[in-house]
Each structure stands twice: as C-alpha cells, then as structure tokens.
Amino acid sequence: MIRAAIATILALMAVPAQAIEIQDVTSPGGIRAWLVQDESIPFVAIDMQFRGGASVDSPDKRGAVNLMTALLEEGAGNEDATAFAQAVEDLGARLSFSAGDDTVSVGFQSLTENRDAAADLLAKALAQPRFDDNALSRVRGQVQAVIRSEATDPNSIAAKEMAAQAWGSHPYATSINGTMDSVASLTRQDLVAAKNRVLARDRVVIGAAGDISAEELGLLLDRILGGLPEQATAPLPDPAELQLTGGTTVIDWDSPQTVVAFAGPGLPLDDPDYFAAFVANHILGGGGFSSRLMAEIREKRGLTYGVGTGLATGLYGQTWQGGMAGSNATTAEAVDLIRAEWARMAEGVTEQELTDAKTYLTGEYPLRFDGNGRIASILAGMQLIGFPIDYIDTRNDKVEAVTAEDVARVAERLLDPDRLRFVLVGRPEGIESDPQE
Amino acid sequence: MRHPASRPAPRLSLALALTFGTALSSLPAMAQDSGPMPQGVSHFTLENGLEAVVIQDTRAPVVVQMVWYRIGAADEAPGKSGIAHYLEHLMFKGTDTLAPGELSQTVTANGGSDNAFTSWDFTAYFQRIASDRLPLVMEMEADRMANLNIRDEDWQAERQVVLEERGQRVDSDPTALFMEELNAVLHDNHPYGRPIIGWRDEIEALTRDDAIAWYDTHYSPNEAILVIAGDVTPEEARTLAEEHYGAIPAKGQAEPRLRPQEPPKRTARRMEMSDPRVAQPRMIRAVLAQERDPGAQQEAAALTVLAALLGGSSQTSVLSQRLMMPGTALWAGASYDGLSLDRTRFTLSMIPAEGTPPEEAEAALDAVLTQFLEDGPDPADLERVKTRIRAQEIYSRDSAHGRAYEYGQGLSTGLTVQDVSDWPAILEAVTAEDVMAAARQVLTPQGSVTGWLLPAEAPEEDATAAPPAAEPAADPALAEPAEQTEVQE
C-alpha cells in the first residue's frame, strides 16, 4: 500500500519536542511537588497521591481505608456533610477522594480567584474529617451496595477470582471495598485509625499544573497539608509474591456470553526488560486493531467485540493480563487462539511490527500532556514510581532502543502459555475447570 | 462505538455505577464574555455544504478531527434497526485506495488513536493525533466520505462483531435489557424507541446492500459537520478542509429530518422486571421533555437547571437532601440532556436504602417532588447551581476534545454554532419561575413510564423453566464518548 509507506516515513520524523518544563518545588514547610506552570486558563489542578493506599488496611479491618476516603467529603470541622459540600460548591471548587490498591488519591481543582478558600476547605477535610454517625451509615450502605453489585457482575467476579488466585495473603488478593461483614463492623475509631495509617506528609507525592507560580504553590500546599501528621502509623505494604498457576477456572454464570480473564507473570517498571515487554504487549494485545489478538479473534473471525492485554504494574506486584467477552458457543475457540498467540510471541516479531509499535508508542506519548488535569496526574504518577524529573525527555529513547531480540527474550521469559491462568465466567461450551479444582 | 471500552479496573471505587441514561454528557458552559463566539472558536462552510467548526488550543501539539454526519438510528426504516451503527463499523473496512483496517493502522502507526460512535441523531468519526499529522487524517477521512468500498469478504464477519457487541453491552446485562424495553415503552411512535445498536433479529438480517444504500443516501458533505480542535489556526484548518473535502460533491439537497412524532400521552405507565443478576432494586422514571431547538433553548435551559437542582450533587441537591440524607434512598438522581433533534427524556432514578421497600421509597420520592412543586427552588440552591455552571465553563476549556463534542453534538442535532455559543448565557438567565414552569411539565405522572428492576432468586439447579433473561433489548451506551485506552506504564 502506498499510503502505508507514506505513513511510515511521516512517523519516522520526530513528533514535536516536548516543551514541558517541570519545576521541582519545595514548600516553606518542606513539602515537595512537581509543577508545570501554565497561565492560559485561570485554574490550577493538583493531584496528591498517598502511598500505600488501601493496601495498608489492617488485616482485620479490610475496607477501612476505602470507607474512610469516601467519608472525607462528608463533613469536616464545624460543617456537616451538607454544609461542607455547599461551601465547596459556593466556590466552584472540585475536590475528589478515591482509594486504590497502591494509593489514596486526593484531587484539587480551583479557580484562581478562590484558590485559598478552596485550599482551606480541603485542609479541613484532610485534618479534621467528622466521620459523623449518619454519614458513616449512609456511605457504608453505598459501599455495601457496590459489594453486592460486584457479586452479580461477571467482570467483577472474574477479576476477584483472578486476584484471589494470584496474591495469596497479600491485600492485593481481596477487594479494597472489604466484605459485607468487614464493612458492617467498621467503627468511627477504625476510620480514624485508617486515616492515620495512610494520610501523612511522609507518604504524599504531588503533581500540579495550571495558573500558579512555584512560590504560590508552596504556600498553598502548606495550607492544604500542614494539618496532617508528619508520619503514617502503618508501614508500607510488603511486595506481593505471585501465586498464579497455569490452567483454567470456570465459574458458572447464566449469560449468553462468557467473560474471559487471563493473566500470567508480569514485571516491575524498573525491570531492565520493562520497555521490551511494553513493546511486546502492544504487538500482542495492547495496540487495539493493530494487535495480533484483535486481528485473529475479532477481525478474522468475529468472535468478540474486543480483546486486549496490558501490563498490570502494581507497585507491590505485577501481572501480564488481558480479557475479552464472547458467545458461549465460541469461547473455546477464542481461548485456544489466545493461548496460541501468547506462545507465538516467543518466536519473535517482524521488523514491521516492531517499527509500527515503536512509532505508535513514541508518537502517542506527547499527546498525553494536553491539559492541566492530565499533566498534574502524570507528574504525581512519575514520582510515585520513582522516575527522575527528566524522565519525559528520555522515555522515548528507551522505547526506541528496544530490539526484536529484546522482545523475543522477554516473551520467552514471561509469555509462557503453561503459566497462563484463564478465569471464565459464563457457560462456555466444551471447557471445564482443571480437574484438581 | 467501534472499539470496545477498556475493561474496568479489577476494583471499583466507591462510586456507584448507576448509569441509567446513555446520552453524551454535555456540560453546560459559560461564555467568558458576551462576544459572538467563545475564545478560540470559529466556523465556516465550504461550497459543497460542509460545515466546519475550529476550536484552537495551542497548549499541546495535539489535534482532534471529528466528522459528524447528521444521520443516526432514529432515521432508520422500520425493520432495519441497527443499520446506522453497522455502517459505522463498515466505514473502517476500506475505500477504493485504503485496505480494510488501514485507516486505523495508519493512525496508530503515527501515534494517534481513532474511534467512532453512533446515536439516534448522528454518527461520528474521530482521530486524535499529533497536530503535524492533521493533513494525513483529513485525507483519509475525506476519502471514506466519498469512496467507501465494502469488500464482499468483510461484511459478514463485521456483522458478527456487531452481534457480539450487542451480546456484551446489552444481552448480558439485565440493566441494559431493562432500559432498552423501558425506552421502547416511552416511545409509542417515535423511532427513539428503537435501540441504537438494533434489535438482534434485525441486525442478523442486515446486508451489504443495506449498508451501501445507507451510505449512498446519507454520507455527503452537506450532511456532515467537521470539527477540528487543538493546535491549529482557523486559517490552516480552512485551507486543509478546502483541499481535502472541498472537491467532494454534495449528493443533492439535504432532506429535512422529519420523523414520526409522539402523540399526546394521558396515562402513567409502569413496568417491572426481576432478574437474579440484579443486586438491589432500582427505579427509573422517564418522561418526554422539550429539547434544545435553534433560537429557542430557554425551556431546555430551565430543565437543565432543574435536573441540577434535583440531583446534581450527592450532598446538596433536593433529592439527596430529602431522600439520601434521611436514609430512605441509597442513591437518587435526576438527568436531562437537551441535545436531541426531537423530544428528549427527563429521568429520575433511585436505589432504595436497605430495608426500605420499593413502594415506600417511591412514595417518599413522590412526596418530595410534590413539595418541590409547591415550594419552588431555594434561592441559595439556585445560585449555587449557577456558580457550578460558571466554574464548569472554565474547567471545560482544559479539554479541547470535550468542547469539540459539544459543538459536534449541537450541530448534528439541529442547532447552529451561535446556539451552542449562546447556551451558557441562556443558562445564566434561568429564573426560579422558569424552573417551576419546566418542573410542572416533567414532574407529572401523565406520560411517564416508571420502571422497577428487581432482584430475583436464582432458580434451583433442576427447576430449569426460568425464562432466559428478557427479550432482545436495549441501547445503552452507544452514544457515550469513546474512550481512549490508556497504555499502562
């Protein structure tokens, strides 16, 4: 195709160099943050990530960090849930709180004109949350509703089973939401304890972008985080050891389609082969319509609406995983194809596949930096992982350096179909769980 | 949508996933001054009738190209449901000079992403890519506007993909099945009652000839809107548009989009469905409501403010205050999207709290609505909603892509660029009286459909007679903004 040739030539020309300048800011109170200053829109976005996340839950209080995080916006200081929310809305500010496996994430967006007042509200939410009884029982009910919904959702059922098989006694093995029972037993005291386990100044990494100077940001961060304790009371989570074995687990579910989840060993971001795996994943199943799995399973055979893979690089444990859904009658065929493609990666990739993957991955990278909100969270994420401040400038070189041999080597090391676990939720025809299960 | 959504992360956060409605979110925006056009926005029309909107944002070297066709599922002939969406899939299957899949592959090989989506009123295609590649994606998008070539060997496999899409989005999801049927009940006569993706047996019967006929009739520059957002000047955009789209001839005059309308409604209709896959009872009540019309958006603005007052905040809005805070409902909300060619929907939805029977929860909701109709909005609440709307306008400038949606959806549902630009000021002018007039239109049993989706015990192992979920079903999310799959790293 002539057009493909033109595209390749275009792609070899460098995408415009990044004009992103990151400032390393230290506040008068000693809080560090990375900042991209841009005055074109009169607001600032700040992303604060507290390391440890829900994985610092005390084992007998599973769900405490998640419930605590959800209650941070439900009243603080002298203001109950309604009064607090009204105050935030009166300023046109946006505060967000969410818990995950690796971090508790706090988002702050404020118009420049109301910045200090909005910061004071967030400071209050972080340092003096009320955890009122009525808010506690209301939000507890919402979390329990999520737990119930997940129990009847085939995607959640599959993910939960995979996590349980993968992570043994590590917190990764169970849901951050906790169970109906564990959430039912949580008290206000447990929430206070959970907050002290994770929300502390020694745990936070911060990215900021928008209409604010380095000096103003420093003062603002002291204002927001000054009321938090210096140190968290719980240690950071231990690394998780992957317990996953190869094989198939079928969970009966009355539906015309089967949800297919699959996972094998992954690798951490600081692994020397990480970028080789990143490129390999794009070719195997990460690249949408360009990927081998989409070509074989959707484009050639119409067996699914979508199939994909990804490197799940948790800070404390990693897998290489994927998923799809398809008719019960053809699930067996699709699973065989996934297994075959998983194995075929070790035979190597073509130069064309390698070149296409690299031009996509390097070309896509600068497109991510297109807004204050997005930039703030990228900056926080880089610090969370431990990347250097100049990572953005060197990252594409690392992608470019990947060779076909590197891809084959990492595939040989990790993409072993005998270590691949399938969890199937549905009524797939002709497939049963492994006999020993 | 042609590409699948990325799979949700294994763990849900607290947010209850309760999307009853499916429309594109269209966040109201405030003009920063009363000038004719918001900052960075301009527009022009080519001689062949192609209308173009340019939204300049030079902060990053990125551009989004969207082409919106003024044709959607509600324009389909009876018996051919799903053809608009099926053709959307087939638009990726090549042209006289592009091989099947080559457009997407070329975009990807250049670091970009692409997707498409279909709704009742429009079908849209977009690419997001480095701004120096804009000519490349324009050339390819223009090519498939004029030269689509659906190969004989491709159309059946793609129909199978659409059936799998329906299986995944609808047939496997009791909420989606229920919403599909509720929507059909709400519309006796208007084609909005049909699912965007189509009824299963009708999708199965669609052919290549159907697709070609649909394309030949409706894909034409005078039926399309081009939106370019990002790092591009209006002059560059116009030059490129002339170069790539200017030579494509219009296929005759654009036909007026006249669909069968709904007759007056006199009754309150009710429906109920039980399914073992439903975790807890949910209620949805829908009623037809005035949409945004060119030059006449006041009632729609009042309905937008009404929805925000009733359900826009889970701590402060009326339903939260009166139903969630006292522990009657776990969740209660209101939604309305005025970007629609014909009459749209105003919906209320609720999940009763554990221990509150559905009928008790519904009675409590009715009492709250009756009280609201007597009292009207609290002035402080109204002011707070407007503050939020004003702030939202500033935040929304952070996403050129989001603004592109707003103009694309507005123009493809019959509005002018001026209407879309005027909207923030019209929202700002809404009074308490306007809100009450709107409330009297939609908070009434007459013409409403109230549905309850209830849990059911799973059948015993040997009691096999349980019916297989419901009938073919629903639409939900074809019109949601397409997601970009994030590469984890």
Image: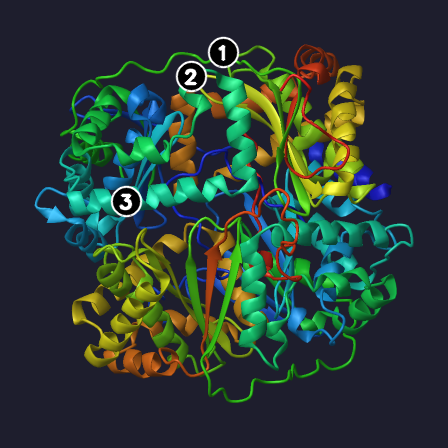
Residue in front for this viewpoint, B79 or B66: B79
Residue B489 in view, yes or no: no
Horizontal and vertical percent position of residue B176: 56, 57
Disc 1 to disc 3: CB gap under 8 Å = no
- Amino acid on which disc 3 is placed: Val
Q: Are marks 2 and 3 on the same chain?
A: yes
- Say whether disc 2 or disc 1 marks the residue closer to the N-terminus: 2
Question: At 14% across and 40% down in the image, what residue appears?
Answer: A130
**Where is mark 2, residue-wise?**
A170
Disc 2 to disc 1: CB gap under 8 Å = yes
The chain identifier of the residue carrying mark 2 reads A
CA gap between label 2 and label 1 equals: 8 Å
- Amino acid on which disc 1 is placed: Glu
Determine whether, in the image, residue A187 is placed left or right of residue A244: left
Q: How is the image coloured?
A: rainbow
Q: Secondary structure at mark 1?
A: loop
Callout in the foreground (1, 3): 3
Determine whether, in the image, residue A145 is placed left or right of residue A220: right
Please, is residue A15 above or below residue A174 in the view? below
**Where is mark 3, residue-wise?**
A139
**Where is mark 1, residue-wise?**
A241
The chain identifier of the residue carrying mark 3 reads A
Disc 2 to disc 3: CB gap under 8 Å = no
CA gap between label 2 and label 3 equals: 26 Å
CA gap between label 1 and label 3 equals: 33 Å
Horizontal and vertical percent position of residue B109: 71, 36
Q: Secondary structure at mark 3?
A: helix
Crowd band around label 2 with a 10 angstrom C-alpha radius: few (<14), some (14–19), many (20+): many
